[in-house]
Amino acid sequence: MCGIAVVVGDDPGVSLAGVDTVSAAYALTGRGPDETVTLHDGSAVFISSRLTHWTAGAATQPYVGPDGTTAVFNGELFNLEELAAGVGMAGGSEIAVLAEGIRTVGVDFLTRVDGQFAVVVRVGQDGPVYAARDRFGVCPLYVVREGDRTAVASNLAALTALTGRDHPLSAAGLAGIVTDWAPTGGRTPYEGIHQVLPGHAVLLNAGDAAPVRWSAPPVDHDDRPSDLADFETRLRDSVAIRMRSTTPIACLLSGGIDSTVIGGIAAELGASTGIGLYLDGDDLVRDRQRQVADALQMSLIHHRLDPVETVDLLAEYVATRRIPLVRLGPVGMMSLARRTRAEGIRGVLSGEGADELFAGYDSYRLIAARAGMFGDPQGLPWSDFGAPEFGIERGPRWARAYWRGLIALSPQAPTRRGDVMRPVFGLLRPPLIAALEQAQAGDAADQTLVSRRQADIDVLLGSYLLTVQGDHAWMEEGVELRPPYLGNPVADWALAQDPASFLSLADGKLPVRQLLARLAVQRPALAGLGFAKAAFRVDSSFVLRSPEASGRLRELMSRCPQELVDAVAVRERWDRCVGAGTCSEAESMLFLLTASLGVLA
């Protein structure tokens, strides 16, 4: 893993004098503390900072081939030996094999890669320059067009250093953050700056060339019953190859079922350390993470987050990552990443992707129930649905009313995340409201399980979980996340199945739950864990526990300009919540957005 930044002109005659390579390289150093190299050959600038995980695939970057082909790469190729043999480079490094594959085959070569990556390759001394991102978006890549040159980078700080100017905020980019917690559709929070979409490639030195999808389209559903043994083999292989490292690999143990399954397999393969994050005062999550670690016979690096640290890290995250937040999960992960790095750990296995691939969210059961999959939608056994993802503390009576209200009484109600913040839309300014209305006008009204899964993969997973809460929280602190569920063989198996086959009235992710039962044969303590849905979750209510933290957050909000948010009214709302000692989820998101805009002002 590393950080990369590149500037290239439309033709070799474009002057690249004055590019601030020093500031761009400095903005990447947290991503790659081992080595930073800059190459300026007249027609392009290539910068790479490297975090080395294994010696066989490592090579100094930027890579320059015999014919002048030049490349930089961020990520891991987990099937390197197979790829190297395919291009006749047995024993070749990751970057050399990637460059040769794209040089000889084109970006279609990337369909052969099982890995996580962002890569820029210039074919020959003056040939086409391709920038591409992995299938699901584990590794980000930002791009901006400036006159007759184009710049790309792993983070926004390096990109703006290359352009040498600030970019105004984008209402359309902020609308994605309000509705989906992260900029979506290839946007960013800034005008003129975009993201290379997961599974896409862009030709950089061809003016405004449109992105090209290189990743394979979703496969057709297999009508045969799913083979659990096949799934287990694929996941075990995916975990095993992601444990490849010259430094210890730890397992992120949230207390949920997805990370527990990964931890169980990794423990069988020799992993001995888990890491967990809990909130000050949250005994339920703290104890559950400890129970999982004990059941897996792992030592646990247990990190506690307090309210004051949360606000301080919010300000730092937004200032350095340049992305406003409406949720505090990225702040928690940033804190945990620092603790992890301080413990000498550079690589972490995580459970990202399981909910999206295996229909794990409540919305999947909601869609299935409305479609009659579990019987007459007007008379289902509401108690069997259990506690919703949010509101677990409200008790079974409330849960029954919740499910009945959404399925039997409101069968056409949309299941959009953006609706959570709708109660406070009145405190937003017209430019942002207009962008929100335009964004939601394109939402599909006739959701199916298949369309919902693809939307979650494209938006929630690629934009938020892997970039804003994943890479920008972890990799910017010098720790690489490796999600085994997103290995190509595992993902292909999941996407070949109808998501309806992963659902029951009470649960989603049935293959994952069945695999846990298999693991419990060897580790019986796993069988006694209930895996209720209460996991790490932090919002502005946590900040309200501390007068000092509350005051600090209000001070950030006081810096927010009035163009996009009615900051004065928001602070008045905050003061009322301080008096009450609590706030709603919609209010929490509004407060965090306002504070973020205050940091960026």
Image (tube, rainbow, N blue to C red):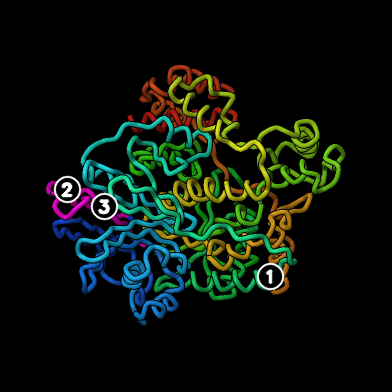
Q: CA distance from mark 1 to mark 3?
A: 51 Å
Marks 2, 3: nearer the viewer: 3
Residue denoted by label 2: 19
Please report the residue visible at 45 percent of the width from the left and 26 percent of the height from the top: 432
Q: Callout 1: helix, strand or loop?
A: helix
* Numbered range of the magenta stretch: 1-30
Q: Left of 441 or right of it: where is 140?
A: left
Residue 71 visible within the image: yes
Marks 2, 1: nearer the viewer: 2
Residue denoted by label 1: 519
- Amino acid at the residue labelled 2: Val
Q: Is residue 594 above or below residue 488?
A: above
Where, by quadrant of the figure, is residue 230 drawn? Answer: bottom right
Relative image position of residue 42 (x, y in whole percent): 13, 57
Q: Is residue 230 above or below residue 356?
A: below
Out of 343 and 163, give the one closest to the viewer. 163
Quarter occupied by the C terminus: top left
Where, by quadrant of the figure, is residue 300 drawn? Answer: bottom right
The mark that comes first in sequence, 2 or 1, is: 2
